[in-house]
């Protein structure tokens, strides 16, 4: 849960008369999750946010699962996804179920369209690039290693300032939040949380654009993309306050935990969703007992599919992976360090691994696009050579 935040000018009470210098009323908008009882913000627009000039369906978002294949460990080399595309409409689906998906895009342009995802929250991991996430709430500067958390319904766009523009998108049907065990009963992140409110970056630099014209917005709802032409610039907010807004957390601000002996992956949990969790594996010292085995033990992840995105080329228990690799270790068979990796980990003092893990509680479909970049022999990599 982010904290209460406010920017710009707002009236002293909710829902009271609030006028522009011209005497016209500002247009108040509640942007809230779960009807009128969930986290919400109140925004004050110069113009009506409801003014739409035209509508058209762009297309259905139809993700095709690859034909059924024998259950096995999978490895996808996303470095082979080289074709830049639109940051919003050109995303490549890789893995998905009804709760969550993982997509990827290398943005072709510096400026994305205005976009609103009305069916899912997004956690966007910036694998490469720098820029600004713009929204009616203000702007958030981002750089590589940032998680951008964009709750559903929030209009936004990306403005890149770097030639590299690689995004990994985790799209969640449920509300994305900080793990409950990191919060006290008052909602504050506790002393034992691996990150604190100081690490959470809220929108800043609210700029108010009072412009009339034709502003194209892409809305995703019911797996369909609709283009709406707004009559006013959507970033026309003079002020807002509340708990519902986009926010950012850099993976480098996740404080990794280390034990005398190996600690399990939930130690690295970063976000909680419905039907999945996200964990961050960050550079850290290894376990410090002289008899510790730093590499993880083999494990059968019953009722969970494990997905790892390798944000650099190092991972203590894996070989054969590269920067941009994604592995899927599905429920139904054990996985663990590959031959030699456990022995090699003994006596090591630290790891520089950087990886984003998505554990889902229901099985994942592999997309047709992912199969095209698959390393087909990965499942054999546990054999002694
Ligand atoms: Fe695992």
Image: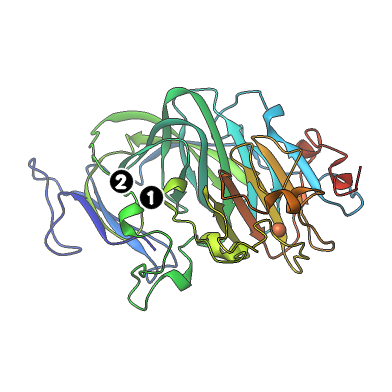
Residue 384 vertical position relative to residue 189 in the rendered view, above or below: above
Quadrant the C terminus occupies: top right
Left or right of 223, for residue 36: left
Task: Kindly check if marks 1 and 2 are in contact, taking CB atoms under 8 A apart as contact.
Answer: yes
Where is residue 333, by image quadrant?
bottom right
What separation in Å lies between label 1 and label 2 (alpha carbons)?
A: 7 Å
Q: Quadrant of residue 140?
A: top left
Q: What percent of the width, then of the height, locates residue 286?
A: 57, 55
Query: How many other residues sit within 10 Å of disc 1, few (<14), some (14-19) or many (≥20)?
Result: many
Answer above or below: position of 317 versus 130: below
Disc 1 element: strand
Q: Quadrant of ligand 1?
A: bottom right
Q: Position of residue 344 (x, y in %)?
A: 72, 48
Residue visible at 62% across and 53% down in the picture = 357
Q: Residues within 10 Å of mark 2 (few under 14, many from 20)?
A: many
Task: Determine which of the numbered discs, if any, sits on residue 203 in the image.
Answer: 2
* Residue at screen point 85% across, 45% down: 381
């Amino acid at each position: 849960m982010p904290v209460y935040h406010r920017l710009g000018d707002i009236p002293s009470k909710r829902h009271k008369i609030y006028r522009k210098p011209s005497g016209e009323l500002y247009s108040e908008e509640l942007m809230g999750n779960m009807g009128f009882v969930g986290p919400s913000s109140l925004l004050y627009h110069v113009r009506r946010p409801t003014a739409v000039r035209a509508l058209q369906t762009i297309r259905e978002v139809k993700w095709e699962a690859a034909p059924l294949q024998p259950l096995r460990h999978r490895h996808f080399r996303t470095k082979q996804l080289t074709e830049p595309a639109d940051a919003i409409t050109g995303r490549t689906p890789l893995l998905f179920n009804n709760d969550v998906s993982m997509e990827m895009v290398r943005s072709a342009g510096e400026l994305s369209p205005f976009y609103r995802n009305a069916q899912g929250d997004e956690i966007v991991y910036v694998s490469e690039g720098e820029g600004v996430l713009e929204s009616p709430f203000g702007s958030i500067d981002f750089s590589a290693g940032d998680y951008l958390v964009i709750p559903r319904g929030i209009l936004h766009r990306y403005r890149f300032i770097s030639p590299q523009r690689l995004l990994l998108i985790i799209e969640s049907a449920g509300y994305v939040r900080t793990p409950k065990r990191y919060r006290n009963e008052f909602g504050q992140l506790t002393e034992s949380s691996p990150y604190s409110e100081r690490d959470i970056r809220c929108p800043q630099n609210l700029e108010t654009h009072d412009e009339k014209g034709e502003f194209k917005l892409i809305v995703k709802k019911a797996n369909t993309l609709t283009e709406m032409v707004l009559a006013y610039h959507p970033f026309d907010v003079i002020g807002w306050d509340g708990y519902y807004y986009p926010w950012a957390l850099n993976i480098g601000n996740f404080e990794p935990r280390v034990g005398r002996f190996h600690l399990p992956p939930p130690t690295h949990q970063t976000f909680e969703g419905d039907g999945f969790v996200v964990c961050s594996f960050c550079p850290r010292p290894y376990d410090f007992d002289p008899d510790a085995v730093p590499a993880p033990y083999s494990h059968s992840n019953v009722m969970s599919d494990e997905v790892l995105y390798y944000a650099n080329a190092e991972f203590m228990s894996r070989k054969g992976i590269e920067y941009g690799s994604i592995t899927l270790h599905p429920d139904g068979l054990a996985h663990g360090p590959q031959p030699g990796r456990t022995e090699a980990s003994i006596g090591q003092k630290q790891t520089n691994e950087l990886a984003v893990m998505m554990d889902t509680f229901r099985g994942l479909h592999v997309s047709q696009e992912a199969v095209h970049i698959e390393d087909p022999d990965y499942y054999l990599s546990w054999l002694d050579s």
